[in-house]
Image (cartoon, grey):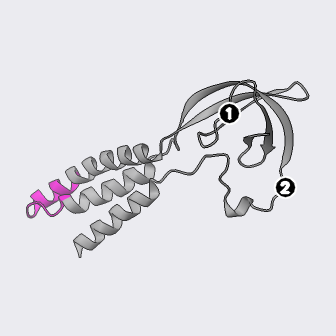
Amino acid sequence: MSKKLLATILSAGLLAGCADNINSDHYTTSSVGKVATVAQCTVLSVRPVTVDSGDTSAGTLIGGLAGGVAGSTIGHGRGSALGAVGGALLGGLAGSAAQKGMSTQTGYEYIVQLANGQTISVAQGTGQPLMAGQHCLVLYGNPTRIIAQ
């Protein structure tokens, strides 16, 4: 039974750590069919950025549970309890690190000037890189995207 529980917890941890697709050509089903305001712009600058969720609580929790279950199989009585505590601590640390590693992506921050003179910044994935000086379109929505014109 404990092997099945451990496998379930580890599987859930892997799923919880998967990164969202942040590329400009990716849409969720809830955003399809919604109207977005569009504005012309020119890319002023591009810089690489790191994007992560900033939240590793799911990895910490799942890793701690898995480590606690695994650690409790060590020894009997008090040894089992100490193993569970040690396993939970180590599992929590490992789960947090694993989720951070799986949810970190690279992207670009684009500083663009709109046709009305306003300057804005948008960070997005690396799927369709744009260059400084390129004429583009800003699609305002959730998320806002910058795409080639």
* Residue in the picture at 25% in, 47% down: 90
Image quarter (top left, top right, bottom left or bottom right) of the C terminus: top right
* Residue in the picture at 56% in, 31% down: 49
Q: Quadrant of residue 6?
A: bottom left
Give the CA distance from mark 1 to mark 2.
Answer: 24 Å
Q: Earlier in the sequence, mark 1 or mark 2?
A: 2
Above or below, 31 relative to 113: below
* Residue in the picture at 64% in, 36% down: 129
Q: Position of residue 48 (x, y in %)?
A: 57, 29
* Residue that label 2 marks: 35
- The kind of secondary structure the magenta stretch mainly shows is helix
Q: Give the magenta-colored segment's residue range.
A: 71-85
Task: Tell me the amino acid under the disc marked 2.
Answer: Val
Q: Position of residue 136 (x, y in %)?
A: 79, 35
* Residue in the picture at 47% in, 54% down: 18
Residue 5 is one of the magenta-drawn residues: no
Above or below, 25 relative to 114: below
* Residue that label 1 marks: 130
> Pointer 1: residues within 10 angstroms few (<14), some, or many (20+)?
some
Q: Position of residue 79 (x, y in %)?
A: 10, 57
Task: Tell me the amino acid under the disc marked 1.
Answer: Leu
Q: Is residue 144 left or right of residue 70?
A: right
Of 81 and 18, which appears nearest the observer? 18
